[in-house]
Amino acid sequence: MVQLRTILRPADNSGAKKLMVIGVPGRVGRNASLGKVVLCVVMGADPNGAVKDHEKVKVVIVRTRKEVKRPDGTYLRFDDNAGVVIDKQGLPLGTRVLGPIAREVKEAGFNKIASLSREVV
């Protein structure tokens, strides 16, 4: 569960060092979970990366510290909050996705992110 002003780790190689959530579209003051798109601002960026410092970007949430209950009754929890920077078409800006991602991301329609990652949990 991610809300406003949450700091996310970038799970890709787009060049961002930290991402801060500044908007949850369509749900003002609410939370977003795995597979949802949020608006973030880049806090620190690599000079040669695809994103620049203080740039507003859309991010898909791929890992959350708060557990998520699945329909089969199991719970899924990660060690960090992480996201992947996407463009307007929903494709990742980076060329690699680092670390495991949740199956809910693939079910939300982000198949390219799921195919770039090494492990889908």
Image: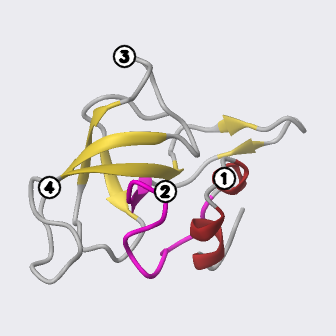
| Distance CA(mark 1)–CA(mark 4) | 27 Å
Give neighbour class at mark 4: few <14, some 14-19, many 20+ (Cα, 10 Å): some
**Residue sitting farthest toward the front:** 89
Q: Tell me which label, 1 or 4, sits earlier in the chain.
A: 4
Q: What residue lies at 34% left-to-right and 58% top-to-bottom?
A: 9
Residue bearing the label numbered 3: 28
Q: Earlier in the sequence, mark 2 or mark 4?
A: 4
Q: Nearer the viewer, mark 3 or mark 1?
A: 1
Q: Residue at x 60, y 62 (%)?
A: 101
How far apart in space, not on screen, are marks 1 and 2 (Cα)? 9 Å
Report the amino acid beneath label 4: Met
User: Tag 3: Cα neighbours inside 10 Å, few (<14), some, or many (≥20)?
Assistant: few
- Amino acid at the residue labelled 1: Gly
User: Which numbered disc, 2 or 3, marks the residue closer to the eye?
Assistant: 2
| Labels 1 & 2 near each other (Cβ < 8 A) | yes
Q: Give the SS element for disc 3.
A: loop
Q: Secondary structure at mark 1?
A: loop
Q: Is residue 6 left or right of residue 11?
A: left
